[in-house]
Image (cartoon, rainbow, N blue to C red):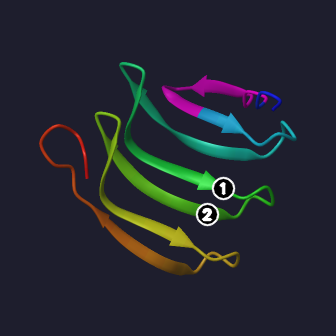
């Protein structure tokens, strides 16, 4: 099985931006602290529309996570609860 190609990424004003395989459109954007996602993050489709957004706390999904349809409308909202030990 071939290894996945790492996504092209850069850091701009403390925000990590990763790109789709095409290297042009943004795949995700958010902050990293101590090597883990932290704070608000967004993920995008190759056409640039917002796909999902949510917040991380010390690398774990926490709080409200929103999934959007291809027209940018809210499709689903999920509440993530971080339990002791870092699991949901």
Residue 51 appears in which quarter of the rendering? bottom right
Report x, y in % for residue 55: 36, 50
- Which numbered dot is residue 51? 2
Q: Position of residue 50 (x, y in %)?
A: 63, 63
- Residue sitting at x 66%, y 55%: 44
Residue at mark 1: 44
Vertical comparison of 15 with 35: above or below: below
State the residue at coordinates (81%, 32%).
Answer: 1
Q: Please tell me which residue is depicted at 54% across the width and 61% down the height of the picture.
A: 52
Tell me if label 1 and label 2 are in contact, CB under 8 Å.
Answer: yes
Question: Which segment did they paint magenta?
Answer: 5-16
Is 76 in the magenta? no
Alpha-carbon span between mark 1 and mark 2: 5 Å
Count of numbered tags? 2
Tell me if mark 1 has few (under 14), some (14-19) or many (20+) residues whose alpha carbon lies within 10 angstroms of its own: many
Q: Is residue 67 left or right of residue 54?
A: right
Name the secondary structure under disc 2.
Answer: strand
Q: Circle 2: is it few (<14), some (14-19), or many (20+) Cα within 10 Å?
A: many
Q: In the image, which disc is placed on residue 61?
A: none
Judge left or right: residue 21 versus residue 37. Answer: right
Find residue 25 and report its horizontal and vertical position in percent. Answer: 79, 46
Q: Nearer the viewer, residue 88 or 20?
A: 88
Sequence-first tag of 1 and 2: 1
- Residue furthest out toward the right: 22
Classify mark 1: helix, strand or loop: strand
> Farthest residue in the front direction?
1
Residue at the extreme top: 34
Q: Position of residue 17 (x, y in %)?
A: 62, 35
């Amino acid at each position: 099985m071939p290894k996945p190609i790492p996504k092209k990424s850069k850091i701009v004003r403390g925000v990590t931006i990763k790109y789709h395989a095409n290297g042009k459109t943004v795949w995700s954007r958010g902050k990293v602290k101590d090597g883990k996602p932290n704070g608000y993050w967004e993920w995008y489709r190759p056409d640039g529309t917002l796909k999902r957004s949510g917040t991380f706390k010390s690398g774990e999904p926490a709080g409200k996570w929103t999934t959007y349809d291809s027209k940018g409308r809210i499709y689903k909202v999920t509440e993530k609860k971080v339990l002791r030990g870092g699991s949901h």
